[in-house]
Image (tube, helix red, strand yellow):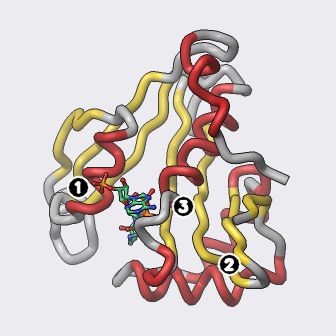
Amino acid sequence: MLFRRFEGRDFAEVLQIEMEAFEDHDPYTYMNFYEMNPEGFLVAESGKNITGFVMGYRSSEQEGRIFSLAVKKEFQERGIGQALLQIMQRHFRNRNVKYVRLEVRASNKNARRLYSRMGFVDCWYEPGYYIDGECGIIMKKYLYPAGLYEDLLTDNWPVIS
Ligand SMILES: CC(C)(COP(=O)(O)OP(=O)(O)OC[C@H]1O[C@@H](n2cnc3c(N)ncnc32)[C@H](O)[C@@H]1OP(=O)(O)O)[C@@H](O)C(=O)NCCC(=O)NCCS
């Protein structure tokens, strides 16, 4: 598995994954995101196939925000989602961001379990956050400063090419 920055040629495959994963998908958001924040758009690639992606951006001096994360169905539960999140966390930490924030549907048990296991905690609920009226949960994770603590555990961290 290779992790690298998104490139224009990946667009169709990323959109395919996104359409499978989310009901309220929007292709233009993805292209706009890439134009404004190419560094924060990463993909996982296996052979010649894109198997997952993550998008994140710095939303304030202190905060990094995960905007979207998805893994192709047949590649789920192999650690790709975790690896993409780890790379994004490192991206933020190297820029001295203090914590990461994300939003998740209350009903999205798989994603919530992954986030909790990675140290994200439920912070508050946003009623009607999603277009169909479902409640969103805001989760956050504190990032230890670069060079401290987590670096001791990063031997197995994915490498981005
Ligand atoms: C949420 C999502 C991104 C997780 O991606 P993933 O690649 O399956 O995540 P991982 O493989 O890293 O972890 C998922 C589970 O698989 C397990 N796993 C990882 N590697 C494994 C392996 N080799 N064998 C068996 N299980 C494994 C993990 O331990 C984890 O278990 P847990 O849920 O009990 O903690 C994916 O389910 C997805 O795309 N969902 C649809 C879109 C979505 O909901 N996105 C999030 C919006 S907020």
C-alpha span from label 3 to label 1: 23 Å
Query: In the drawing, what numbered circle is on residue 101?
Result: none
Q: Nearer the viewer, mark 3 or mark 2?
A: 3
Q: Look at 29% across and 41% down and name the residue there.
A: 116
Q: Nearer the viewer, mark 1 or mark 2?
A: 2
The percent position of residue 156, horizontal first and vertical second, equals 63, 38
Q: Which residue is mark 1?
A: 136
**In this picture, is 63 found above or below 33?**
above
Secondary structure under the numbered disc 1 in the rendered image? strand
Quadrant of res 73 = bottom left
The percent position of residue 34, horizontal first and vertical second, equals 73, 64
Quarter holding ligand 1: bottom left
* Residue type of the residue flagged with mark 3: Ile
* Residue type of the residue flagged with mark 2: Ile
Q: Which residue is mark 2?
A: 50
Q: Is the CB–ligand 1 distance for label 3 below 8 Å?
A: yes
